[in-house]
Image (cartoon, grey):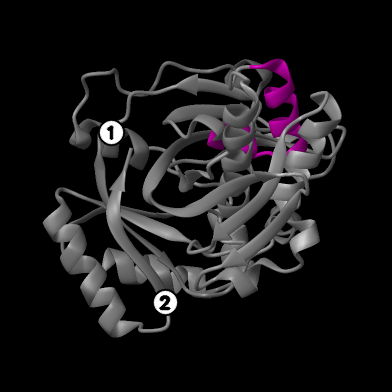
Amino acid sequence: MPALSDEARAKVNLTLQVNGRRADGFHDLESVVAFADCADRLTLTPGSNLELTMSGPLALACGETSDNLVLKAARLLAERVPNMKAGSFSLDKVLPVAAGIGGGSADAAAALRLLSQLNGLALDDPRIIEVAELTGADVPVCVNSCGCVMTGVGETLQPLNLPKMPCVMVNPGVPVATKDVFAALGLRNGELLVGATDVLLQDRWPDDNASLEDWVEALAASSNDLEAPAMRVQPVIGDVIAALNATNGAWLARMSGSGATCFAIYENTAEAGRAAEKIRRDHPGWWVHAGTLS
């Protein structure tokens, strides 16, 4: 059979509210999630052996291949699908690692899409959904890679019709472990930050016909609750947000996920392109992408 290929698009948390920490230690979140037009590429060549090879500019940052979420997702699915067809995965890694943009989760989600295609499974097959949740909190939202409100520990998704948002994404080249950021947040098991009724989904996001301006206004009224603790772990995140805010036309600058990647939204792609060029000149060691979120 011919090889199959798919893109693993970067996930961006436009907002991230921490509602509390459950008794089991997991944090309850509400996040507006968009996806960028930058992506890793995952290829599956059908065969008898399940394996993974990595290439690309950021392959070395991925660590041990055996620990990769692509293989974890594939193995979990094989436990649930009798005689599952698989093969050799090849990952072209261009997204920063431990960067708050779900790179590893997007790779695992791409693996599930490819295995679904190879085995004739629907993406809403309960086994795909279960494996996505078991693989990692960001994997379920990455399976469909569509704008949505994500709640709970990532298992509840409400679709959103987001406009195309011209953006610049910047990572300063320092990995940030999610566990370290939540440790800096410092919530105890069972500690709530909002009342129970506030955790329910609220219809506070713009409707399907809303403009980019409407969305930026709504997003600006929210925040990323992990931004301050992440800055305590890696103060350079503050420098990234300052650099984005210093560009012409930046409407909103914020950190994504648990960091250290940050983004800014612009009125048009030309302004975003000029902003990216300025940041590349001023900070040649940083990873910079100009594109769109949707």
**Badge 1, how many Cα within 10 Å: few under 14, some, many 20+?**
some
The picture places residue 12, in percent across and down from the top left corner, at: 46, 46
Residue 125 lies in quadrant: top right
The picture places residue 121, in percent across and down from the top left corner, at: 63, 20
Question: Vertical placement of 68 versus 174: above or below?
Answer: above
- Please tell me which residue lies in front, 235 or 270: 270
Question: Vertical placement of 20 versus 172: above or below?
Answer: above
The picture places residue 156, in percent across and down from the top left corner, at: 61, 22
Image disc number at residue 286: 2
- Please tell me which residue lies in front, 207 or 38: 38
Give the amino acid at mark 1. Trp
Residue pictured at 86% horizontal, 31% vertical: 79
Q: Nearer the N terminus, badge 1 or badge 2?
A: 1
> Is 56 covered by the magenta stretch?
no
Give the Cα distance between marks 1 and 2. 28 Å
Report which residue position mark 1 lands on. 215
SS type, badge 1: helix
Observer able to see residue 22: no
SS type, badge 2: loop
Looking at the rendering, the stretch of residues picked out in magenta corresponds to 125-142
The picture places residue 29, in percent across and down from the top left corner, at: 62, 34
Question: Vertical placement of 223 versus 93: above or below?
Answer: above
Residue 25 lies in quadrant: top right
Question: Vertical placement of 59 versus 225: above or below?
Answer: below
Residue pictured at 69% horizontal, 53% vertical: 185
- Please tell me which residue lies in front, 80 or 88: 88
